Amino acid sequence: MGTKSKTISFRVDEDAFETLREIAEERELSLSAVFRDYVDTLVAHDGQVDLVPADKGPEEGEGFPPTVEVPKSFIREHERLELEADHLREQLEEHKRYIDYLREQADEEEEVVKLEELDGDENTYQIG
């Protein structure tokens, strides 16, 4: 079974169209050939295409997409910080639940002693 060609259409503004036409003329290609070359390159490189001016080629050792080496100590520290953040989130949730529990207990208490009422009371209370 042979491969069938499909048509792709899209709109560009007038300036972009003129630029693309100039590129096609410089390469002595039709405008559709320029797009076919671009699409073929895009497919061949799994969607990772870097457009570079003709006078500036890719630098030695520079691939696309760019990669950066990260020391293992940095990765370990990042993982440690993520675990610590998870632990702190769990503690925060635990404290929130405890505060909610204390609020419920305070709401259920019927006897509330106000400090103003203690001033005239014979019984003395000492804190501490």
Image: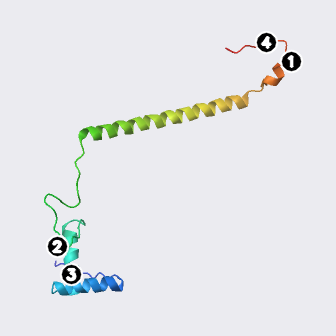
- Closer to the chain start, of discs 3 and 4, is 3
Q: Quadrant of residue 117?
A: top right
Residue at 24% across, 42% down = 71
Q: Is residue 124 left or right of residue 128?
A: right
Residue identifier under label 2 = 55
- Closer to the chain start, of discs 1 and 3, is 3
Q: Amino acid at mark 4?
A: Thr
- Closer to the chain start, of discs 2 and 3, is 3
Residue identifier under label 4 = 124
Q: Which mark identifies residue 41?
A: none
Q: Amino acid at mark 1?
A: Gly
Could you tell me how far apart the alpha carbons at marks 3 and 4 are, in whole angstroms? 95 Å
Let me know if residue 4 appears in the view.
no
Could you tell me how far apart the alpha carbons at marks 1 and 2 are, in whole angstroms? 94 Å
Q: Position of residue 114 (x, y in %)?
A: 79, 25
- Closer to the chain start, of discs 1 and 2, is 2
Residue identifier under label 3 = 34
Q: Quadrant of residue 84?
A: top left
Q: Nearer the viewer, mark 2 or mark 3?
A: 2
Question: Regarding mark 3 in the picture, which secondary structure is present there?
Answer: helix
Q: Position of residue 60 (x, y in %)?
A: 13, 60
Residue at 38% across, 36% down = 83
Q: Quadrant of the C terminus?
A: top right
Let me know if residue 116 appears in the view.
yes
Could you tell me how far apart the alpha carbons at marks 4 and 2 are, in whole angstroms? 92 Å
Residue identifier under label 1 = 120
